[in-house]
Amino acid sequence: MALPTFTPTFPNQNLGTGDELALAIEEFTGIVEGTIERQSKAAPFVNIRPVRGTTTIVNDAIGESTLQVVTPGTTPDGTSENQTARVALTVDTLILARTNIPLLDSFQKNWDFKSEVGREHGKKIAKFTDEAFFIQAAKAAGLAGSAFGALPGHAGGSTVTLDSSADAADPAALLAAISDLFVKFEEKDVSPSVDDVIVALRPAAFYALLDADQIVNGEYITSKGTKLEGVKMLKALGVPVVSSNNVPNTNITGHPLSNTRNSSAYDGDFTKLVAVAFAPNALLAGETIPLTTAVWYSEEKKTWFVDAHLSFGVTPNRAEYAGRILIP
């Protein structure tokens, strides 16, 4: 005896017709996040703290100790003041990538437009976050004094200026400049290899070093034990190096994360910047909303929306862990 038939409802079917999986969107988040993971150069090297239940996070710092000579017959007094100070980061901006797709067009497109939009959102967000990190690393490098003020034992960033603009494409001059920069680091008790310093170069400078066999493939283990495979390394110095078009080299005004509250912290003149070197300690970074994606349909607007949004911020922390190379 034949079993009775019935009509199922497919919740992922659009308007009850066509492909039963038309509305399935799980793949979208993976596409955006995967794209960011592939595209971002700075994110693997930056510690990003969660900012929840507040708008602001702080880093406290303590000044160095002082020594004294003990005189026989005299009770030593406390002479080491160990002053303290802090830097603060406020996360107050939501960044959104949104694409609107009219309902009719969503039916008539002959390839997976939503997925491709997701990839483009991922690329743009990766570039945006990298630029923000590089901006603040360059600003930390440019500080004459500590971000914590006149706190004993803390110092400003480091700068090396090339002899000429042409040196930005000269591998020997570039390597000498990076070495000079690392000397400045070590004079401030920062060890580039131990403290996870990364060097980020504009593409022309990176490939000048690559063509001169100064860059090799390697495996890098951070001080926290995180293994990074397939990392480009400076052969002579043993530190990671990346090529990024997001190392700023223009005069930036009206950056989306700049506002009156942070005194336009992401704006600046970077026209002379060739490279920036920094360790995780150089930056205080936080996020309130991690990358969040969605594909959703508005019956009222008869439109599909493809969204990707996040909320983060970054500011200089330990300036002595940051350096930059400039052209004259």
Image (cartoon, grey):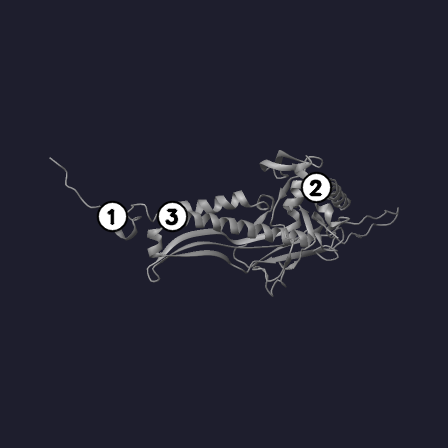
First-in-chain label (1 vs 2): 1
What residue sits 57% from the left and 53% below the top? 286
Residue, disc 2: 192
Q: Position of residue 237 (x, y in %)?
A: 71, 37
Task: Determine the secondary structure under disc 3.
Answer: loop
Amino acid type of the residue that numbered disc 2 sits on in the rendered structure: Pro
| Numbered disc in front, either 3 or 2 | 3
Separation of disc 1 and disc 3 at Cα?
Answer: 18 Å
Horizontal side of 141 relative to 47 (left or right) equals right
Residue 25's disc is 3
On the image, the x and y values in percent for residue 46 come to: 60, 46
Q: Amino acid at mark 3?
A: Ile
Q: Secondary structure at mark 1?
A: loop
Could you tell whether 273 is left or right of 246 in the image? right
3D distance between C-alphas at marks 3 and 2: 44 Å
Seen as rendered, the residue at the extreme front is 166
Q: Is residue 197 visible?
A: no
Asked if residue 192 lies left or right of residue 98, the reply is right
